[in-house]
C-alpha cells in the first residue's frame, strides 16, 4: 500500500520539525523551511519556502499531498493569503488540512476554560489572526479540515524553556503570571496526538492540551526545578486582580485514554540537563 503523502508547512520550526520527526517513518512526509540550514537543504523532502515571496501552489503541485499540516509563522498578511490559497487547493483536490491554532482564539473570555464548540473571541492580534484562518477553514467540508487548538507548549528543546534558561543564566528575571490558569502541552505529546488524528482520518475541532489546569506561576517554578539547579529571579506580573483562564479543554472530541495527559506529565517530561 502506498504511504500517505503529508506536507508540513513550517517544517523547520520547533513544532513543525517535531511533527516531521514523528511522522516521517510512517508517511511519505515533506516539509518547508525558510532559513537555509544545511540539514534542510540536503534533505530532499524539504522545500525552501518564503511566505512573503513564494506562492504555495508551486509546492502543492509538486508534492500533491493528501494531508497538509500548517504550522506556518511569520508575516500575518502573508499567512492569510497562503491559507486562502490552501483552502482553494483543498476545495479542488482530495486533501485534508490540519491547522495549528491557539488557545488565544479565546483570550477575550477569561472567566472560564474554553471548549471546542465555544464561540471564539480575541483581544490580541495573534488570536484574531488564528480566528480569521479558522473561519476560512470552517467553510470547507468538515471532512477536509482539522482545527487543532493548542495551549502553551513546553518541552526540553522548546523556545519557552530555552528563553527561561537564557534569562536565568543572564541573571534576568523570569516573568510569571500568578493569576493565569492554563493547560499545557509539549512537543512530544502533541506530535503523537497529531499522528493519531492523521492515522484515523479524524477531522473537526480538537483541543490538544492537558486534561487539567494549573496556575502559570506554579507550573513554571516546577519546570525550572526540573531543567537545572537554578536559583531564578521570579518576576510576578499581575494583569488582573482575579484569576483569568487561557485554557482549551476537550469536551466533544476526546482522544483515546493513552493520548490524554495531565500537566504533571508535562512537568515530569522535563529532564534535568
Image: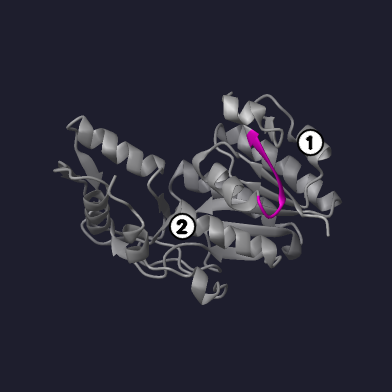
Residue 120 seen in the figure: yes
Contact (CB < 8 A) between labels 1 and 2?
A: no
- Residue drawn where x is 43% and y is 48% of the image: 123
- Residue drawn where x is 58% and y is 52% of the image: 22
What SS does tag 2 mark? Answer: helix
Residue 75 in percent (x, y) is at 56, 31
Q: Which mark is residue 57?
A: 1
Range covered by the magenta-colored residues? 25-32
Residue 182 in percent (x, y) is at 35, 60
In the foreground, 8 or 143: 8
Quadrant in which residue 107 is drawn: bottom left
Q: Residues within 10 Å of mark 2 (few under 14, many from 20)?
A: many
Residue 193 in percent (x, y) is at 56, 62
User: Residue 30 colored magenta?
Assistant: yes
Q: Which mark is residue 106?
A: 2
- Residue drawn where x is 21% and y is 46% of the image: 237
- Residue drawn where x is 40% and y is 62% of the image: 247
User: Residue 199 colored magenta?
Assistant: no
Amino acid at each position: 500500500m502506498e504511504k500517505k503523502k503529508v506536507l508540513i508547512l513550517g517544517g523547520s520550526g520547533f513544532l513543525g520539525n517535531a511533527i516531521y520527526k514523528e511522522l516521517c517513518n510512517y508517511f511519505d512526509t515533506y516539509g518547508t523551511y525558510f532559513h537555509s540550514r544545511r540539514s534542510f537543504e540536503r534533505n530532499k523532502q524539504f522545500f525552501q519556502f518564503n511566505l512573503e515571496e513564494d506562492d504555495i501552489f508551486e509546492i502543492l503541485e509538486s508534492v500533491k499531498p493528501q494531508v497538509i499540516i500548517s504550522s506556518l509563522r511569520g508575516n500575518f498578511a502573508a499567512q492569510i493569503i497562503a491559507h486562502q490559497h490552501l483552502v482553494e487547493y483543498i476545495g479542488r483536490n482530495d486533501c485534508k488540512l490540519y491547522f495549528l491554532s491557539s488557545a488565544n482564539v479565546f483570550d477575550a473570555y477569561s472567566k472560564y476554560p474554553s471548549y471546542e464548540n465555544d464561540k471564539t473571541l480575541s483581544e490580541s492580534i495573534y488570536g484574531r489572526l488564528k480566528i480569521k484562518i479558522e473561519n476560512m477553514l470552517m467553510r470547507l467540508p468538515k471532512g477536509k479540515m482539522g482545527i487543532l487548538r493548542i495551549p502553551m507548549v513546553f518541552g526540553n528543546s522548546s523556545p519557552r524553556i530555552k528563553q527561561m534558561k537564557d534569562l536565568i543564566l543572564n541573571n534576568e528575571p523570569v516573568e510569571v503570571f500568578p493569576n493565569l490558569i492554563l493547560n499545557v502541552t509539549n512537543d512530544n505529546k502533541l506530535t503523537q496526538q497529531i499522528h493519531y488524528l492523521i492515522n484515523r482520518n479524524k477531522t473537526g475541532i480538537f483541543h490538544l492540551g492537558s486534561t487539567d489546569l494549573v496556575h502559570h506561576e506554579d507550573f513554571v517554578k516546577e519546570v525550572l526545578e526540573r531543567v537545572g539547579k537554578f536559583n531564578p529571579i521570579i518576576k510576578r506580573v499581575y494583569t488582573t486582580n482575579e484569576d483569568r483562564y487561557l485554557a482549551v479543554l476537550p469536551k466533544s472530541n476526546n482522544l483515546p485514554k493513552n493520548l490524554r495527559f495531565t500537566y504533571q506529565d508535562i512537568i515530569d517530561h522535563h529532564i534535568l540537563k
